[in-house]
Amino acid sequence: MAAAVSPTSLESAPRIMRLVAECSRSRARAGELRLPHGPVATPVFMPVGTQATMKGITAEQLDALGCRICLGNTYHLGLRPGPELIQKAHGLHGFMNWPHNLLTDSGGFQMVSLVSLSEVTEEGVRFRSPYDGDETLLSPEKSVEIQNALGSDIIMQLDDVVSSTVTGPRVEEAMYRSIRWLDRCIAAHQRPDKQNLFAIIQGGLDADLRTTCLEEMTKRDVPGFAIGGLSGGESKGQFWRMVALSTSRLPKDKPRYLMGVGYATDLVVCVALGCDMFDCVFPTRTARFGSALVPTGNLQLKKKQYEKDFRPIDNDCACPTCQKHSRAFLHALLHSDNTAALHHLTVHNIAYQLQLMSAVRASIVEKRFPDFVRDFMGTMYGDPTLCPTWATEALASVGITLS
Amino acid sequence: SGGFQMVSLVSLSEVTEEGVRFRSPYDGDETLLSPEKSVEIQNALGSDIIMQLDDVVSSTVTGPRVEEAMYRSIRWLDRCIAAHQRPDKQNLFAIIQGGLDADLRTTCLEEMTKRDVPGFAIGGLSGGESKGQFWRMVALSTSRLPKDKPRYLMGVGYATDLVVCVALGCDMFDCVFPTRTARFGSALVPTGNLQLKKKQYEKDFRPIDNDCACPTCQKHSRAFLHALLHSDNTAALHHLTVHNIAYQLQLMSAVRASIVEKRFPDFVRDFMGTMYGDPTLCPTWATEALASVGITL
């Protein structure tokens, strides 16, 4: 076998991903995840089913849009009501009445974001609850215990996350600690047959640190890897280089979950770089501002120009909003029953993301992904050559040219 | 008609014999919403039932303004009828005014029922008036409205009010209450309401209402909705809004079935018993109103 760019995994590691097709130019792959609550086609965008910063879409609507994996909220549906409660409700699936797959985060990120008094030590993340003043320690063991109780199909290690804008020794400290916490999560995991624990690659924007993290974490026996610590405030140039570095060192036969991505362009580029799974609040958050996602960018539907525009948001979109409602109606609704309007837009924006991923996947399977990318960029930017520099460079690095 | 909302939403509005004159807060333009204009707009909208433009005064207003508004509403009704371009496709309803004054309301009823309209609304109530005055005006109105035309009681309401006003002879109702109360995390049930944000629902795995057929009750528990109210609030309010609307619709279906099956008085007694713990604990105004039409609790 020729020297592979990516290492192969330990023989004993579980294989939850089946590769269906690979792009012969770029690193793009189409695959299928075999998860306890059913198969999931990749590349996949995972909406957030319920989350404090996301609004509006119900589990029923996600199901109707064809979503087969979404993110469950460890903090609000797990930590706060308590894992005993969730177990009583037959796990997070039972509690939410969601029949498909769930991915839960460790709870750490939200705690650090939402709780002002939090402190990271080797033990874990110590914080004071804003609700009752109690001090809690979220350790790797505790996080896994909670996620075991939630019963989600994919669970995430507790990692020591630092913002991508942080420099200095803290980045290195967090990277090494994340490796140690990964080992503690693996040791604490009570249900490896039913729940897939993913590692999260850290190392910030430092190529050496990230490489070290990749080398170490890929020695561990986990079913999948997330690329973490990005999609913060870093430049897009640094962003894509860290993604590309990560995918070049992750095993081919395991899924790569790029956390916190994203915008349509970012999704397409990062599929080209070899990522399989994505999540982001962007589509739902932008809906809240009256913005509808379309292949040419977005429509700010509150604007007067849509007042008499009787076309659907997108003629080719199969979502309920586009099937039933015009831009003019949504415009009027945005100025009267705003909540209902935002609901329609949220449904559409999620559908947009899911349909984009389906189209990407089909192009990979049908061996025309580079052409798809060129068409996509042409539609989005008016001309492929007007694509942002970082994206052009990233695509070129994996053999896709735009002109 | 557009009149009520304009008066509510637009601070600079002025009622004259011509119509409601107001200054748009968006572009400063002055517009006159006249009876003719209101009907023209509703003709364009194509709705199945359209409402006359009426001169509405709050039920807490007293004095000559009430009488002026009542007589003007009759004149505006005639102008609406004359302006209506699509009587074959759209049903124009009159709106009985007269405030809480029995004489004025009676006059309005006498006059408006002389006009050839397909239905009548009872207006000018469901404001700040006492419930005692409210039911008496409703009863007065239904006693003077033709039996063979629908009676639409505007702005009602709470479940108890719906049941009582059906007993008093009303057929159609509208109210923001179920959707508004959902926005505060309140779910309507036969015993009143559940404030689902409260800690007592944290581990309550029952649906909002075991007998409710709505999607929310079919799929989700109180515990889940409680957690959702504290995290993805908008999705939670959506579920509650669906349930509360379903509650109102199912209530009306149950009321109707009891009338058809000739057991409406028993239905009312059961309803009040469930809502208040005991039929005798029903609010006084409701007990009196029901007694006035022969239903004792």
Image (cartoon, coloured by chain):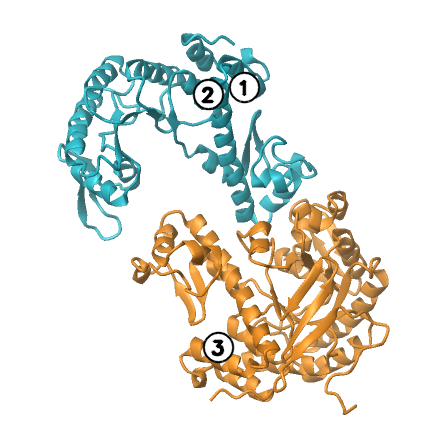
Chain colours: A orange, B cyan
Disc 3 and disc 1 on one polypeptide chain: no
- Asked whether, in this view, residue A376 is left or right of residue B154, the answer is right
Q: What secondary structure is found at the residue carrying circle 2?
A: helix
Q: Tell me what residue is drawn at x 19 percent, y 23 percent.
A: B115
Q: Are marks 1 and 2 in contact (CB under 8 Å)?
A: yes
Label 2, residues with CA under 10 Å away: few <14, some 14-19, many ≥20: many
Label 1, residues with CA under 10 Å away: few <14, some 14-19, many ≥20: many
Residue B101: percent from the left, percent from the top? 26, 15
Image vertical order of residue B91 relative to residue A270, above or below: above
Which mark identifies residue A319? none
Q: Which residue is mark 1?
A: B271
Q: What secondary structure is found at the residue carrying circle 1?
A: helix
Q: Which residue is nearer to you in this view: A154 or A114? A: A154
Residue A184: percent from the left, percent from the top? 83, 65
Q: Which residue is mark 3?
A: A376
Q: Are marks 3 and 1 in contact (CB under 8 Å)?
A: no
Tell me, yes or no, if residue A52 can be seen here: no
Q: Which residue is mark 2?
A: B163
Tag 2: residue type?
Val
Chain of the residue under label 2: B
- Asked whether, in this view, residue B252 is left or right of residue A176, the answer is left
Tag 3: residue type?
Phe
Separation of disc 1 and disc 2 at Cα? Answer: 8 Å
